[in-house]
Image: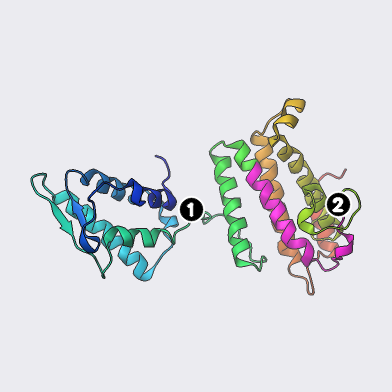
Amino acid sequence: MPRVLPSQVIEYLSIGNRPQNITGINGTVLISALTSGYLSGLVRLIEEIPNEYITISGIDYGNLIFSVESIKNAVEHWRPANSMALQPHNRKGLLELIHAALVKCPDAVPSPTTTELPFVDDEEMRKSIRADLSSASSALSNGEWKAATVLAGSVCEALLLWAIPKAKDYDPQEIKDSRGNCCAPENLELAAFIDRASALKIITTGTRDIAHRARNYRNLIHAGRAKRLAQDCDRASALAALAAAESIIRNLKMASEAENGLTLTDAQLASDASQYAKK
């Protein structure tokens, strides 16, 4: 069964998609031979939204449930020979109440098993990165290798972009592009992110090596490169990218325990690096 997202229902509710004469005075919802199918479809779509995507509570959730159940009950008891009018609730039409509730619900919610990122102090960034990590894991489970590879790679970039300026020994004058010119961290390529993070001791050499391998896989999303190398994203590329993301997360969790900026201790660097084959 296809996954229904809140935004899809919002689009379904748009004025241009509604049957003519579905609403009357003050937002009354009219049930007739012309509107019953549309309203039944609306109820079914809402019921197929995964529970974790309904993040509202309080009055918004109450309005959503009241509106959906009112429409569902009315359609089930409606008879073609008659018409039925559903009155507004709290002075608002039921379709408008449903719309107002669903616009507050996201289209991307991390699964409960997704790794937490407590060290990321920017709430919106933390939610965004974790949502991408969850989507990458879901794509891997569904055999969507390219999506998993790209999303996990973006998680690596986002984490390092957040972390590098917070490193204990960070010096903005040392951030340079491929030509040796000083630049902002966000202007670095992924390879430079990885090397700079390793130099700043916020990821280990073992994680650095994993991340570089994942970076090489992620480059295969470019059609020209894939053609030249006769390769493409596959399960190996997806696993490598996710392994890199999880390794970076593990290192940043440890580095966040330091005072006055992110850094790994010599013991942490040695212990983590010893788990991987050295170059």
Q: Nearer the viewer, residue 42 or 118?
A: 42
- What residue is rendered at 79% in x and 44% in y? 212
Instruction: Give whichever of discs 2 and 1 has the lower sequence position.
Output: 1
The quarter of the picture where the C terminus appears is top right
Task: Report the disc number at residue 221.
Answer: none
Amino acid type, callout 2: Asp
Amino acid type, callout 1: Asp
Is residue 225 in view from this perspective? yes
2 vs 1, front mark: 2
Q: Nearer the viewer, residue 165 or 27?
A: 27
Q: Quadrant of residue 230?
A: top right
Residue that mark 1 sits on: 107
Q: Residue 7 location, x and y as percent?
A: 44, 51
Q: Quadrant of residue 172?
A: bottom right
- What residue is rendered at 85% in x and 61% in y? 200
Residue that mark 2 sits on: 177
Q: Quadrant of residue 122?
A: bottom right
Dots 2 and 1: beta carbons under 8 Å?
Answer: no
